[in-house]
Image (cartoon, rainbow, N blue to C red):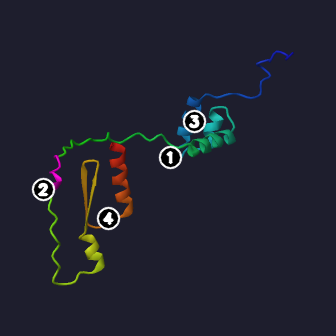
């Protein structure tokens, strides 16, 4: 059986979170003395330093600055496959550098009734992202 606890003999004091935040905020003011603030509020300065470190280590709760804006999107129906005519690309009179030729390329993908054209220099991550979005939409 446990003996009854005498509140006068309790050595460990408990401080609520609001009190801790208030004191830490006081220490953040310009010219504030942590030792003087701790003394004025009846706590040890080391304890107040500990609260400051704990609050600094805690990630700040970030609130969104603005709400996301959704834009309206319309999709035109695809023309029938018989209406699409692939014309051969004419050969350029001056030979372009490989980097410029890659930038002028077009990738066309038709998946599940949707046609996606990627023009210019396209990296693998972009193509992967587009294909993943198409797969998730199906």
Left or right? Give the position of 29 relative to 135: right
Left or right? Give the position of 111 relative to 73: right
Instruction: Find disc 2 in the rendering and name its residue.
Output: 83
| Residue 122 badge | 4
Comparing marks 3 and 1, which lies closer to the viewer?
A: 3
Q: Position of residue 137 (x, y in %)?
A: 33, 43
Magenta region: 76-83
Graded by Cα atoms within 10 Å as few (under 14), some (14 to 19) or many (20 or more), the crowding at tag 2 reads few
Q: In the image as oriented, which residue stretches furthest toward the right? A: 1
Q: Residue at x 38, y 56 (%)?
A: 128
For this rendering, which residue is in front, 132 or 33?
Answer: 132
Q: Indicate which disc, 1 or 4, sits on the residue closer to the N terminus.
A: 1
Q: Position of residue 106 (x, y in %)?
A: 24, 65
Q: Residue at x 78, y 20 (%)?
A: 8
Q: Indicate which disc, 3 or 1, sits on the residue closer to the N terminus.
A: 3
**Residue at mark 3 to residue at mark 4: CA–CA distance:** 54 Å
Instruction: Find disc 1 in the rendering and name its residue.
Output: 30
Q: Is residue 81 magenta?
A: yes
**Residue at mark 3 to residue at mark 2: CA–CA distance:** 74 Å
**SS label for mark 2:** helix
């Amino acid at each position: 059986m446990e003996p009854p606890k005498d509140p006068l003999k309790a050595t460990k004091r408990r401080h609520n979170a609001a009190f801790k935040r208030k004191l830490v905020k006081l220490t953040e003011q310009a010219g504030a003395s942590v030792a003087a603030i701790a003394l004025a509020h009846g706590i040890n300065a080391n304890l107040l330093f500990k609260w400051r470190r704990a609050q600094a280590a805690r990630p700040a709760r970030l609130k969104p600055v603005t709400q996301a804006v959704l834009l309206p999107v319309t999709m035109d129906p695809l023309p029938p496959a018989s209406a699409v005519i692939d014309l051969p690309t004419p050969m350029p009179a001056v030979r372009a550098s490989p980097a410029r030729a890659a930038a002028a390329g077009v990738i066309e993908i038709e998946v599940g009734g949707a046609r996606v054209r990627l023009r210019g220099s396209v990296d693998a991550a972009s193509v992967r992202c587009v294909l993943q979005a198409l797969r998730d939409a199906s």
